[in-house]
Image (cartoon, grey):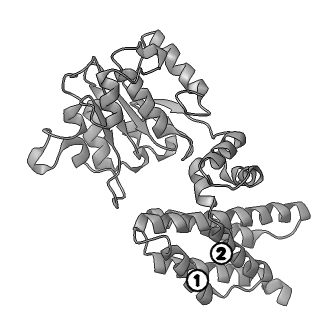
Amino acid sequence: MWQGIQGHDAVVQQFRETLAAGRLATTYLFVGPEGVGKRTFALKLAQSLLCTTNDPAALAPCGQCESCRLFVAGSHPDFQLVDRERGVRSLKVEQFIGDRDHRNQEGLCHDISLRPILGHRRVAIIDDADWFTPESANSLLKTLEEPPPGAVIILVGTSRSRQLPTILSRSQVIRFQPLSLETVGDLALANGLAPDTAAAARLAERSGGSMTRARDLADDALFDIRDRFMAGWNAGHLDASRFARELEEFINAAGKEADARRRRFHQFLGLVADRLLASLRQSAIEGEPSAGLLAAIDRCLEAEEQIDCNANQATLVEAWLDDLATILQGQHEPARR
């Protein structure tokens, strides 16, 4: 475990060797599942690089120098953190080059070009790198192509496929693996997500190595509504209008923030798709028809994409359920004949 961060010792060793050889790149892209500690790792790496007491190659910030104290306080003059603003779906051009009245006088690209104040480097972290628009990515392009001396930029995303080519081609990709089930179980217990080791182990099994997913799946109500949906599906009868009202109520209970509601809808769809996929595997073993299951899984994945495109929630809930009811009806038509 490095600096309290579990599961990424191989990445730590990679950076130590890079720093010892004097080959630190200017731009890194961290990719890997959500909730495995990429942002936390990036922050601790930034503090290590900015520490003015210890050798950066040791990756052990002293915690006592002025640089470390300012970093922990969130007021380091040579560090910037850019992420999506609350309630905004994408990274904005203004975050990189300033608004129209202050073009190239504000923003990350301007600030990281200034001379360092405390040490020899400036470091910037761009979280939510999956959410660049072509315009915001292009506004960063010149800085990536001609980085200022001593600048280090760390982008944090989930996968290469979510990155725009202009970003991907100018970054050194660092891959983060899912956390081990043991690690997730230990963290679930430590963070109060599970009452005992047995519950923590079950949660870890569901998590796919992601603490974000473990936190999401700690909600028993999520599994209750999934099970009610699956009961109707398995019985061959889905009351779409009734369940739409129930699902809308469940989603809206996440709160007033649109992001929270979208996330809860995502969680539900993911659990349904997982259960349908398990049924599909069983059908393949038993040699039974599976076209309906395939269509239902595809519709779940399509609905997840529509959530990301900011589709109207109520309309999407109704359309998704109507489509699945139609698929289910078609699946049972041969039996009726």
User: In terms of depth relative to the viewer, which is nearer, 200 or 298?
Assistant: 200
Evaluate whether residue 33 shows in this view: yes
Of all residues, the one furthest to the left in this rendering is 101
Residue hosting label 2: 225
User: In terms of depth relative to the viewer, which is nearer, 119 or 74?
Assistant: 74
User: In terms of depth relative to the viewer, which is nearer, 307 or 119?
Assistant: 119
Residue occupying image coordinates x 28% and y 17%: 120
| Left or right: 260 as drawn, with respect to 241 | left
Q: Residues within 10 Å of mark 1 (few under 14, many from 20)?
A: few
Which quadrant is the N terminus positioned in? top right
Evaluate whether residue 337 shows in this view: no
The label number, if any, that marks residue 68 in the structure image: none
Q: Check the image and report above or below for 133 versus 220.
A: above
Which amino acid type corresponds to the residue marked 2 in the rendered image?
Answer: Ile
Residue 99 lies, in percent from the top left, at: 16, 49
Q: Residues within 10 Å of mark 2 (few under 14, many from 20)?
A: some
Which quadrant is the C terminus positioned in? bottom right
Residue 208 lies, in percent from the top left, at: 67, 49
| Left or right: 173 as drawn, with respect to 213 | left
Q: Quadrant of residue 112?
A: top left
Q: Quadrant of residue 183?
A: top right
Q: Check the image and report above or below for 329 versus 55.
A: below
Residue occupying image coordinates x 62% and y 55%: 193
Residue hosting label 1: 246
